[in-house]
Image: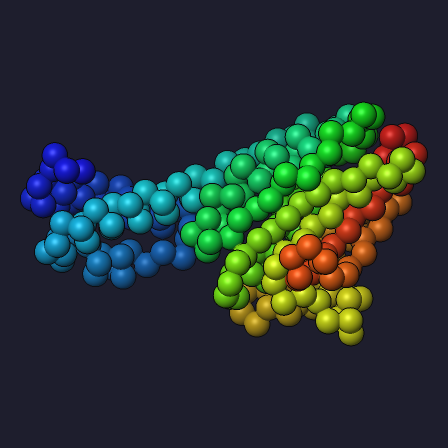
Amino acid sequence: FDEFNKVDYINIFNANENKYLRVYSEEMGSININTCRKHSLVDYVEIDDIKASFNDLDNDIQRISCYSDLLMAFLKKNKRSEVKKLSFKNVIETIVKYYKILVDEYNISIDISNLQEFSCEIFMKQIDLESIIVNMLTNSFEALKGTGGKRVIKISTIDFGEEYQIVFEDSGPGVPDNLKEWIFIPLNTTKEEDGVGLGLTIVKDIVESYNGKIEVGKSNAIGGAQFTVIFPVDEVKDE
């Protein structure tokens, strides 16, 4: 940046403004181009403001790219049809790599330091496991983004011999006892504006299709909600 002056920045932005705004409108659908243009770099007079605008633009395009990559990964046919050996650890690490960029701007960290590499492999449809992970991450993200203090999502995997567990924890407000069953009913949501009320229902349906279960409690480690997904070993191995 330092080798450019303010005129250079403005010329670069003007040359690419339509391209940037077109990417926004095509990928996100909800971006108002006229609103964006009200905040064009040509309206800024300070070089630091121009640098900040370029950084914001780059971050937004990076997030759009992550959404697109995640969506395209879900659409692969073999993930939707094949039942194959899966590693919980590998699939979780891949999803978190994409998702981390989406939550960074909210100062939310994702801790996956307690992922175990199980000695035996698990037979599942990959799209099912990925759907569980993405929906649970989204549930934690929605619980955290309006809170203060340290914002943490933690994912752990545990091999108990007779069952495998994926534990999702967050440092949010938690789930009241009177809502622990209610949140799994379709279209029920605690989110006032953005919630659809299907994410946890989808997770529960997938888990139960493998004769598993999902339990809700409080995280002793970071104080918020804890969702434990449990798969009986014989079921997931012989699916």
Q: Quadrant of residue 124?
A: top right
Q: Quadrant of the N terminus?
A: top left
Q: In the picture provided, is 48 more to the left or to the right than 97?
A: left
Q: Residue furthest bottom?
A: 178
Q: Quadrant of residue 165?
A: top right
Q: Quadrant of residue 46?
A: bottom left
Q: Nearer the viewer, residue 163 or 128?
A: 163
The residue at the point 69 percent across, 37 percent down is 115
Residue 108, percent from left and from top: 51, 52
Residue 44, percent from left and from top: 14, 56
Q: In the picture provided, is 155 more to the left or to the right than 29?
A: right
The residue at the point 66 percent across, 33 percent down is 91
Q: Across the whole image, how many numbered discs are drawn on residues? A: 0
Q: In the picture provided, is 29 more to the left or to the right than 216?
A: left
Q: How is the image coloured?
A: rainbow
Q: Nearer the viewer, residue 218 or 239?
A: 218
Residue 197, percent from left and from top: 66, 63
- Residue 87 at least partly seen: yes
The residue at the point 21 percent across, 61 percent down is 38
The residue at the point 81 percent across, 53 percent down is 214
185 over 63 or under it: above or below: below
106 over 74 or under it: above or below: below
Residue 16, percent from left and from top: 21, 40
- Residue 80 at least partly seen: no
Q: Quadrant of the C terminus?
A: top right
